[in-house]
Image: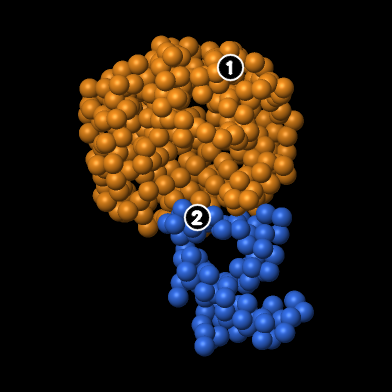
Chain colours: A blue, B orange
Amino acid sequence: MFWGEVPVKNPRLADQKIDGEYFVVQPLHKELHQMDETASFIWQLIDGRRNWAAIRERIAGQYDVSEKNLSADIAEFRRFLIDKGLIGK
Amino acid sequence: MNPSVLLFRKAFEKRIPLETVWELTRRCNLFCRHCYLPLKERRMSGNAERVSAPAGEIKKGLAELKKRGGLFLSFTGGEPLLLAGIWDILAQARRLAFDVRLFTNATLIRREEAGEICSLGLSAVEISLYGCEASTHDYYTCSPGSFERTVEGIRYLTGEGIAVWIKVLLMRKNIRQLNKMSMLAGELGARIRFDPLVGAGYRGDINPLKHRIALKEIGKLLKKSSADFSGELPACGAGRNIFSIDASGNGTPCLMLPISFGNVFEEGIVRVWKRLGSFSELHCEECAKRASCFYCPGMVYLEKGKAGGRYSLFCDMAGHA
């Protein structure tokens, strides 16, 4: 599993938080991604120091969600971030 | 809804300076005959400090802009690469996670500069080109050899994999070179876009208008390019989600609307942007052609000396679209 992995944002991105949601520009793919409230919370936690386990712990403290569902959601979001080139592998 | 449309709409409604066009200097190494900036201010000799922004102040302003909701940033000139400290400014803008574009004539870009731009992660470089051959381009820039240097600069940039947009202002001498310019852009690995309308210069200078192509030619172009112009045009965001800052630090709705709402170096971005909220430009609210109108308040301001109101040029263009 990937929980010990420390995600690092792609340094080529641009982002801005507007109305509680992050908008992230991926210039290489010429894409703009809008993140919902939960995704924005995770995006903010990706600071190049925390690993995925620490991020999961912070989210568990914030949202009322079962551990199984939370782990699955984070895994899916991580896959999305990697596929879109928003974080390094 | 497309996130880009949503983002700009949100910023428009909430008056967030999502996009800023920052003029770093008015000095230029070319002397384009159609430029809207006064030639005296573009000349490279003397008074550099009066027509160039102080790098330290710009860096401070960038942090303020980011806090206020800024995301897209375009640095322009004059020729921005003439500004001492330009690389520090670009680096700072990228550190703050802005999406940065550089508007340049590319004559000062060689391998080293292209490498630097690549490593900084600028999203694109936009370059003005006025013809597919030296005789036309150099005629407009009044600078022999500029075509070659610009094309060479583009090659260095695309060689580094940097996204390059060639911007062509269509004028009387280059209007017949559309296809050849598109081919040249393809050969250089760049994308290209055309602007059919030369505007007047600052302080009532109507000389640039001599180079404007005839309305019927503009009409033909709009018809030919219908795919590019289809759909409702976005409302002008000047002063709503777009902010402009000139080389002296004056905050304006747009560089084409040089109406100062205060100096950002003296008062800070937040105060000037807030004051800019009193700017409103309304035009033709009830017009049936509004959705296909290219109305540019800045162009109207430079030609008529006042912002807003009906302007027949755009009415006629909307009729052709």
Q: Residue at x 54, y 15 (%)?
A: B316
**Mark 2 residue element:** strand
Asked whether the residues under marks 1 and 2 belong to the same chain, the reply is no
- Residue B72 in the image: x percent, y percent? 54, 47
Answer left or right for B81 relative to B53.
Answer: left
- Front position in the image: A26 or B179: B179
* Three-letter code for the amino acid on which mark 1 is drawn: Cys
**Mark 1 residue element:** helix
Q: Label 1 to label 2, Cα distance in Å?
A: 34 Å
Q: Could you tell me which chain the residue with mark 2 belongs to?
A: A
Q: Which mark is residue A31?
A: 2
Q: Counting other residues with Cα less than 10 Å from the Cα at mark 2, is it few (<14), some (14-19), or many (20 or more)?
A: few
Establish if B150 lies above or below B18.
above
What residue does disc 1 label? B315
- Residue B100 in the image: x percent, y percent? 48, 48
Q: Residue at x 75, y 76 (%)?
A: A62
- Front position in the image: A4 or A83: A83
